[in-house]
Image (cartoon, helix red, strand yellow):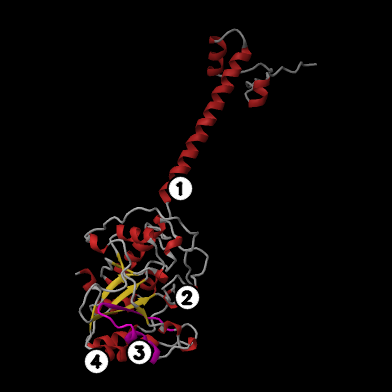
Amino acid sequence: MTETPQVHPAQRNQGLTAPRDGAGTPRRRPFYDWLTRRGPRNPAAGRHVISTVIRSRRAAALGALLCLLVVAVAACGNGNGRPRAAVTSASRTTSGTPAPSTPTSQLPSGTGTSPATAAPAGTTAKSPGTRPSTGLPPTPGPGLPASLLGRDWERMPTDRKVVALTFDAGANADGVAPILATLAREQVPATFFLTGQFAESYPAQVRDIAAGGYRLGNHSMTHPYFTKLTDAEIRGQVLGAEHDIRSASGGDPRPLFRFPFGDRDQRTIAAVNALGYVPVRWTVDTLGWQGTSGGRSVASVTDRVVSALTPGEIVLMHLGSHPQDHSLLDADALPGIITALRDRGYGVVTLSALLA
């Protein structure tokens, strides 16, 4: 009976048994022979060296594959080549959380800003957890005088009897045509604060606004609560909106910015200043966004503007219609508001007067 040749454990485990000829005599490869000849007179030692070399080669190949995977992932990035918002981006990044639709009673003190300014239907807005204030002083943005930094302006600093009419755009564009028609007919200037999503969803209306020569402002990318964003997310929101507004209009929204929902603190004001923007709030909100179903009317909208009348007044109105009753109270009240202002000796200016 032919004796079964003995195989070293190192060969058995690694599949390194030397091949044999028809007579059962091992056929050694040159590298195998060299190792066993040059090494000590112990065949097991040679076979152990071969096993070690092969294991090293396998490890090196695996390491190279992992490096290639890391480089490929890093090169892909987020795939859109744009800043992240909350995006991104300002990549227009959004979460699965719907844009908040908050009643006036639940808004930050002194806001009363409309849910109609929120992102268009079918879109989402990011609402991360609250972030602590950095406590850092505001850093001047490009070309911003120090006198404009560190605050959210509620009126223009003037004794002249002038008013700035401002319109926030975010939900829909139903009021754009009648508002532009009234402004053109009355030869009255205005300032329009646009979200990036509005500019992306309604580029034709944005072009119409820009073609009328009206001043543009930045209203964020997706209309989130800014005090709940990190500084990086704020940067994405502001720069993402700036990109989309410029793309749609050909105009530059800088340096005017309005916080969504009027939600701000010293940290967020400083972050916006550092990006080259001056935050502009309002003296009075017409509350036309609450619609007829919310108990508002053309008369109540007009009365709110007249009752708050003061030199440098900033009036907040909205471009969108009410989502349920589809009323356009700000657009409908605009002719009467202009007449009431003129009757009281007031003129209308853009927010460029704030920057003068």
Q: Disc 4 designates what residue? A: 343
**Alpha-carbon neighbours of circle 1 within 10 Å: few (<14), some, or many (≥20)?**
few
Extent of the magenta region: 298-321
Q: Which of marks 1 and 2 is nearer the N terminus?
A: 1
Camera-side mark, 2 or 4: 4
Q: Mark 3 points at which residue?
A: 333
Residue 86 on image: x %, y %:
43, 60
Q: Earlier in the sequence, mark 1 or mark 4?
A: 1
The mark that comes first in sequence, 2 or 3, is 2
Residue 16: quarter of image: top right
| SS of the residue under disc 2 | loop
Q: Earlier in the sequence, mark 3 or mark 1?
A: 1
Cα–Cα gap, marks 3 and 1: 54 Å
Q: Name the residue under label 2.
A: 121
Q: Are marks 4 and 3 in contact (CB under 8 Å)?
A: no
Q: Name the outermost residue toward the right.
A: 1
- Point out residue 55 in the picture as x, y percentages from the top left corner: 56, 27
Task: Tell me, yes or no, whether the two marked residues, 2 and 3, touch with CB atoms within 8 Å.
Answer: no
